[in-house]
Image: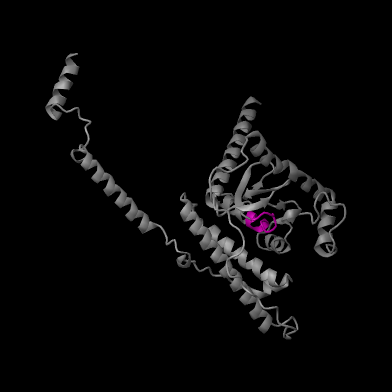
């Protein structure tokens, strides 16, 4: 009691008859509080006007994206105008992936960003069509002759076509085994012990085109932790069949590839997929060693996704944006690895 009395006396000497938690002097009257609120509103308006982009449709700034279209690579695929458009869209998607812009919370700003992206899509489409028509007009065939006839003229639309999700602008309507869903396509490289070596997130629905990036990501992750050994064989399902990337992985990354050209449910080869590397790969898979290697794939990578989605109940991302989804996916795979190592340590100690 004596100590409490001393504390009260000291506070009385410091604050007088006040309690010590009173409002500041300028907020103790109604007029003072109104003036302070008005000033706070004016400050918020100034900050909003300084940070928010112009809302006029004609003033939306479209960032220029440098698109490099190599006619030697594109023409070799014999895809015509669509091949040039696909390559341009791929480069634009890579540009946005490297930008890794977060998805803003404000709906108004998301709508403006959606408008900017759709205008950017249209600009890239126009550039790809101009490059294709220039090639058709001035290009030469393999024998040095001018191409036979000019292409049909391209008429750009008045407004950007297509749709975009205004909640998560990076996401896509990706195909699932049973339907479609708005989200991402997650990738993982797994060892025989079901340890995830690399984890990436893509906005494209098919697995086609992810073989080489995932092999490079795996080597990069291994080099980061000081592992000099590289994987000897990359085993993947038929969705990863990409001849150009398979050649690069074998020649540049020094990793052998074992991918069936036919899906597992298919009883006969695809039309036109005969001879050459198709037959060679089927023969490699038909050998005892090749068959054993490929059969181990299901026991390596499929349980990782089953454990994540069904046992751990992680079947969706909780954050928006590709960079946020990538961080979340890597956190999920990291905790998966920790659980695996923990169980291995317990089993080793018990033995």
Is residue 272 toward the left or the right of residue 252 in the image?
right
Quadrant occupied by the C terminus: top right
Residue reaching furthest to the top? 1
Is residue 118 toward the left or the right of residue 283 in the image?
left
Display colour scheme: one colour
Q: Position of residue 211 (x, y in %)?
A: 68, 56
Q: Position of residue 95 (x, y in %)?
A: 55, 62
Q: Residue at x 60, y 51 (%)?
A: 201
Residue 126: quadrant of the picture: bottom right
- The span picked out in magenta is 204-215
Q: Please determine whether, in this image, residue 269 is positioned above or below residue 2.
A: below
Residue 14: quadrant of the picture: top left
Q: Which residue is drawn at 68% across and 75% down?
A: 72
Is residue 267 toward the left or the right of residue 62 in the image?
right
213 in the magenta segment: yes
225 in the magenta segment: no
Q: Residue at x 80, y 62 (%)?
A: 277
Q: Position of residue 305 (x, y in %)?
A: 67, 41
**Can residue 225 be seen in the rendering of this structure?**
no
Residue reaching furthest to the bottom? 145
Quadrant occupied by the N terminus: top left
Of residues 90 and 127, the one nearer the viewer is 127
Of residues 255 and 76, the one nearer the viewer is 76
Of residues 304 and 36, the one nearer the viewer is 36
Q: Where is residue 170 in the image (x, y as percent from the top left)?
A: 56, 54
Of residues 30 and 13, the one nearer the viewer is 30
**Can residue 112 be seen in the rendering of this structure?**
yes
Residue reaching furthest to the right? 268
User: How many numbered marks, from 0 up?
Assistant: 0
């Amino acid at each position: 009691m004596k100590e409490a009395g001393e504390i009260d006396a000291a506070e009385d000497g410091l604050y007088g008859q006040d309690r010590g938690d009173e409002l500041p002097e300028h907020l103790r009257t109604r007029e003072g509080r109104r003036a302070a609120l008005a000033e706070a509103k004016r400050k918020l308006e100034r900050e909003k006007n300084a940070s928010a982009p112009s809302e006029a449709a004609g003033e939306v700034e479209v960032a220029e994206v440098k698109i490099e279209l190599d006619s030697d690579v594109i023409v070799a695929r014999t895809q015509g105008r669509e091949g040039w458009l696909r390559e341009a869209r791929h480069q634009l998607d890579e540009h946005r992936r490297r930008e890794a812009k977060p998805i803003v919370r404000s709906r108004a700003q998301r709508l403006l960003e959606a408008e900017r992206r759709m205008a950017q899509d249209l600009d890239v489409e126009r550039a790809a069509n101009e490059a294709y028509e220039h090639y058709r007009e001035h290009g030469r065939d393999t024998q040095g002759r001018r191409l036979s006839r000019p292409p049909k003229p391209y008429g750009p639309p008045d407004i950007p076509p297509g749709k975009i999700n205004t909640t998560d602008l990076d996401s896509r309507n990706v195909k699932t085994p049973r339907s479609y869903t708005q989200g991402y396509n997650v990738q993982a490289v797994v060892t025989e012990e079901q340890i995830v070596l690399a984890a990436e997130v893509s906005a494209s629905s098919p697995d086609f085109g992810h073989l080489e990036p995932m092999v490079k990501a795996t080597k990069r992750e291994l080099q980061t932790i000081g592992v000099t050994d590289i994987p000897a064989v990359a085993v993947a399902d038929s969705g990863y069949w990409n001849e150009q990337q398979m050649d690069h992985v074998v020649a540049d990354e020094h990793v052998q590839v074992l991918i069936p050209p036919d899906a597992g449910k298919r009883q006969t080869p695809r039309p036109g997929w005969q001879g050459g590397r198709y037959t060679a790969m089927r023969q490699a898979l038909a050998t005892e060693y090749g068959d054993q290697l490929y059969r181990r794939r299901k026991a390596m990578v499929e349980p990782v996704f089953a454990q994540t989605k069904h046992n751990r109940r992680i079947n969706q991302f909780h954050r928006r944006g590709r960079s946020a989804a990538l961080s979340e996916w890597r956190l999920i795979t990291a905790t998966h690895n920790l659980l695996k190592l923990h169980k291995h340590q317990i089993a080793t100690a018990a033995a």
